Image (cartoon, rainbow, N blue to C red):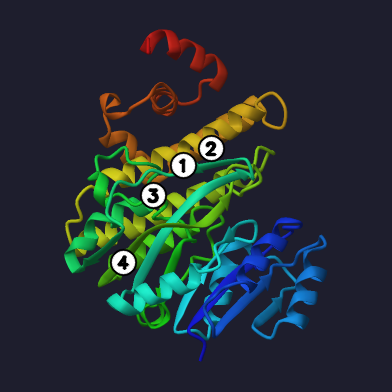
């Protein structure tokens, strides 16, 4: 049985997949499985993956005839992982040679269910951005101590007042983590295959709520390539973005409510509201960008109707005062929704004057 299964789903990622898979083949940890899921790629990725699999017996390549989305690919791979531990990397990123070895030895040392390192944002060889962390070089949390990490899985940045030495950037991300495989399977942790957005946040929300031991290594070993073509941030018009985002809101809210029924996790209820705001902000920005082009005024009205009818969104706007919403854009989005059916652009202009900051 391999010590670690490294999972890498791929969909049309040439030329970046060459760096990604190349970094996995250079891992210093012996006895690894590299499990690659070709999610029905239509570019040169498929041919490249087949060539690498023929050269390297550590690579298990599964080629799908139909694209099953990112969450479907993660779920498919986890079911087939043979390693004692598993980790996932995106096919446009890359990792240091000792990435798997460092996480594995740390996980063994502390018997950790989840082990995590740091990442940077990689724009190109000359531009990388380091995410801030002010804690010790190594940290281990047990039992109830992990509750402070649970809300971090569904929020961007530290805007909720988490202690700086206990705030871990990118806690919700699918990457930079090593999971004990038996922990994942014993707790029936699965990716929601209906989710195309924030499926990793939703998975980690559940995972951290079940974990008994969490270990953190203060080393940057994962390099996240910052692209504009991600499912969430792709600037091209996507008619499925609204229903996909509503699915994410519903799934995350359901998980939060289930967790809060079992234990009063600090800040989780507040962060749940912030997650809803984040999702709505992405949707509003997407429709705003394409209003007058791919999006008509009627499309905008229909979208606002759909959002307004969502039970979780209704609860968010009913329970949240405007004074609790920080930042100009967030205030605008908040008031836009509370005063629905007004054309987005003109309302934004009016609100900038009315709110005054």
Mark 1 and mark 4: Cα distance apart in space: 29 Å
Residue topped by disc 4: 215
x then y, percent, for residue 288: 59, 27
x 46%, y 26%: residue = 340
Residue topped by disc 2: 283
Q: Nearer the viewer, residue 160 or 177?
A: 177
x 39%, y 49%: residue = 169
Categorize mark 4 by other alpha carbons within 10 Å: few (<14), some (14-19), many (20+).
Answer: many
Q: Is residue 343 above or below residue 262?
A: above
Q: Nearer the viewer, mark 4 or mark 2?
A: 4
Q: Nearer the viewer, mark 1 or mark 4?
A: 4
Residue topped by disc 3: 169
Tell me, for residue 279, which label it has, or none.
Answer: 1
**Sequence-first tag of 1 and 4:** 4
**Sequence-first tag of 1 and 3:** 3
x then y, percent, for residue 182: 39, 83
Tell me, for residue 225, which label it has, or none.
Answer: none
Q: Is residue 143 left or right of residue 185?
A: left
**Given contact means CB atoms under 8 Å apart, are the residues at marks 2 and 1 in contact?**
yes
Q: Is residue 278 left or right of residue 231?
A: left
Categorize mark 2 by other alpha carbons within 10 Å: few (<14), some (14-19), many (20+).
Answer: many
Residue 96: name its quadrant. bottom right
């Amino acid at each position: 049985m391999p010590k670690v299964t490294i999972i890498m789903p791929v969909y049309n990622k040439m030329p970046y997949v060459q760096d990604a898979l190349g970094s996995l083949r250079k891992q210093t940890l012996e006895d690894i499985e590299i499990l690659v899921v070709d999610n029905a790629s239509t570019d040169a990725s498929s041919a490249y993956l087949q060539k690498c699999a023929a050269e390297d017996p550590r690579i298990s390549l599964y080629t799908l005839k139909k694209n099953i989305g990112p969450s479907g690919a993660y779920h498919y791979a986890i079911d087939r992982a043979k390693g004692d531990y598993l980790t996932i990397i995106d096919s446009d990123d890359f990792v240091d040679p000792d990435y798997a070895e460092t996480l594995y030895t740390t996980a063994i040392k502390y018997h950790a269910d989840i082990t995590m390192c740091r990442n940077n944002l990689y724009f190109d060889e000359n531009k990388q951005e380091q995410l801030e962390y002010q804690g010790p070089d190594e940290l281990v949390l047990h039992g109830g101590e992990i509750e402070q990490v649970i809300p971090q899985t569904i929020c961007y940045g530290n805007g909720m007042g988490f202690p700086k030495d206990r705030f871990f950037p990118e806690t919700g991300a699918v990457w930079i983590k090593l999971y004990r495989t038996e922990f994942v399977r014993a707790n029936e942790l699965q990716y929601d295959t209906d989710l195309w957005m924030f499926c990793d946040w939703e998975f980690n929300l559940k995972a951290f709520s079940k974990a008994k031991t969490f270990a953190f290594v203060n080393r940057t070993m994962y390099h996240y390539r910052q692209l504009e073509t991600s499912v969430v941030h792709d600037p091209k018009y996507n008619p499925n973005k609204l229903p996909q985002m509503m699915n994410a809101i519903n799934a995350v809210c359901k998980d939060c409510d289930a967790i809060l029924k079992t234990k009063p996790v600090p800040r989780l209820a507040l962060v749940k509201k912030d997650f809803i705001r984040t999702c709505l902000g992405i949707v509003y920005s997407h429709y705003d960008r394409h209003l007058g082009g791919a999006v008509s005024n009627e499309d905008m009205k229909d979208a606002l109707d759909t959002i307004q009818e969502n039970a979780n969104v209704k609860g968010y706007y009913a329970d949240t005062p405007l004074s609790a919403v920080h930042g100009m854009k967030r205030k605008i989005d908040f008031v836009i929704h509370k005063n629905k059916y007004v054309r987005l652009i003109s309302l934004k202009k009016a609100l900038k004057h009315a709110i005054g900051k």
